[in-house]
Amino acid sequence: MPSTAIEDIHCASEKVRSLVARIPPFASVPAAIDAEVLGGVLESMALASKRLHELPRDLHDADLEMEIMGYKRNLESLGQVLPRIQGTLLTEKARLEHARVHLEGAAAWVRASKKTL
């Protein structure tokens, strides 16, 4: 059981670390992160969480403890960049909403133009 837990926690840790690495610390806009990447990270985190909850409380495994510490560090780093990711997503949402309103206006104009012709 601990070796499977170590592997799953390591995998989740690496995916979180990779996601955080895609977001430069001082860039105004984080690098593009697609839904597939986020989904993979969330799936790995859910599995790691499951493994952590399945571990006996009295288990003392040095390798597992080291992996858990690394995972915690990566989660803390993710916590620091999440507000920037959220800001970027909100900005993109506003841009898309503006484009949708513009297109609806243009479509209404075309419909009105067809009626006057």
Image (cartoon, rainbow, N blue to C red):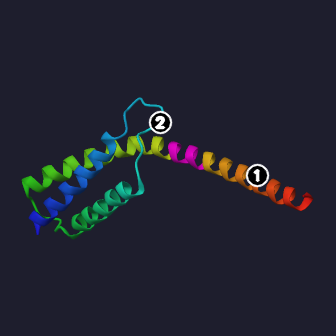
The CA span between labels 1 and 2 is 30 Å
Looking at the image, which is closer to me, 61 or 94? Answer: 94
Q: Which residues are magenta?
A: 87-93
Looking at the image, which residue sits at the far front?
117
For image coordinates 38% across by 32% down, the residue present is 25
Q: Which residue is mark 2?
A: 29
Magenta stretch contains residue 92: yes
Side of 62 where 53 appears, left or right: right
Q: Residue 21, relative to residue 66: is it above or below?
A: above
For image coordinates 26% across by 68% down, the residue present is 50
For image coordinates 13% across by 66% down, the residue present is 4
Q: Amino acid at mark 2?
A: Val
User: Magenta residues: mostly which secondary structure?
Assistant: helix
Q: Which residue is mark 1?
A: 106
User: Nearer the viewer's eye, disc 1 or disc 2?
Assistant: 1
Q: Residues within 10 Å of mark 1 (few under 14, many from 20)?
A: few
Q: Secondary structure at mark 2?
A: loop
Q: Position of residue 48 (x, y in %)?
A: 25, 62
Residue 80 marker: none
Q: Position of residue 61 (x, y in %)?
A: 8, 58
